[in-house]
């Protein structure tokens, strides 16, 4: 069976496919970096800070940690946070070129954020103590 592609085209396609599978393709790297950037930003996203930034109002300084209803589905601000988070995440994913998948990526990002916040609530003190001890011993 003869191929409709030339030998050169087949070799080029093969090498580009292998580079893509190894994560060496520049376009895939760019998209991967953009995706990671949005996830990193959304994990630490705070609706109060975001609102203050968009309205140019300084954020009040507070002591302690604010969880903002991320974890508990039954907490009062949970639905508000979820709605705001998904809206902002979709906006960011669309801005970075993922508009087709923005809704699904936003849901995934919300779930990842919930997992990370839960881990911090349950085990944060243990990890932070270990990191401080490791940093002091270096």
Image (cartoon, rainbow, N blue to C red):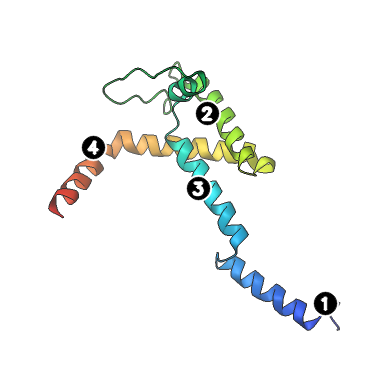
Question: Alpha carbon of mark 3 to alpha carbon of mark 4: how far?
Answer: 26 Å
Q: Is residue 3 left or right of residue 18?
A: right
Q: Which residue is mark 4?
A: 125
Mark number, residue 85? 2
Decide: few, some or many residues near mark 2? Use Cα within 10 Å; few <14, some 14-19, many ≥20: many
Decide: few, some or many residues near mark 3? Use Cα within 10 Å; few <14, some 14-19, many ≥20: few
* Residue drawn at (67%, 40%) of the image: 99
Q: Is residue 30 left or right of residue 1?
A: left
Earlier-in-chain disc, 2 versus 3: 3
- Residue 24 vs 47, above or below: the answer is below
Q: Secondary structure at mark 4?
A: helix
* Residue drawn at (61%, 33%) of the image: 91
Question: Alpha carbon of mark 4 to alpha carbon of mark 2: how far?
Answer: 26 Å
* Residue drawn at (61%, 66%) of the image: 20
Q: Which residue is mark 3?
A: 36
Q: Nearer the viewer, mark 3 or mark 4?
A: 3
* Position of residue 42 measured from the top left corner of the image (x, y, whole percent): 48, 36
* Position of residue 134 measured from the top left corner of the image (x, y, whole percent): 18, 51
Question: Alpha carbon of mark 1 to alpha carbon of mark 2: how far?
Answer: 47 Å
Circles 3 and 1: CB atoms closer than 8 Å:
no
Mark number, residue 119? none
Earlier-in-chain disc, 3 versus 1: 1
Q: Secondary structure at mark 3?
A: helix
């Amino acid at each position: 069976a003869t191929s409709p592609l030339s030998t050169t085209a087949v070799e080029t396609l093969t090498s580009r496919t292998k580079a893509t599978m190894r994560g060496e393709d520049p376009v895939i790297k760019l998209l991967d970096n953009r995706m990671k950037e949005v996830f990193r930003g959304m994990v630490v996203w705070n609706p109060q800070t975001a609102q203050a930034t968009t309205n140019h109002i300084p954020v009040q300084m507070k002591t302690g940690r604010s969880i903002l209803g991320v974890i508990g589905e039954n907490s009062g601000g949970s639905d508000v946070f979820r709605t705001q988070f998904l809206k902002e995440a979709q906006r960011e994913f669309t801005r970075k070129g993922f508009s087709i998948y923005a809704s699904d990526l936003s849901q995934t990002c919300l779930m990842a954020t919930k997992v990370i916040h839960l881990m911090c609530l349950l085990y944060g003190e243990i990890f932070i103590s270990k990191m401080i001890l490791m940093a002091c011993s270096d």
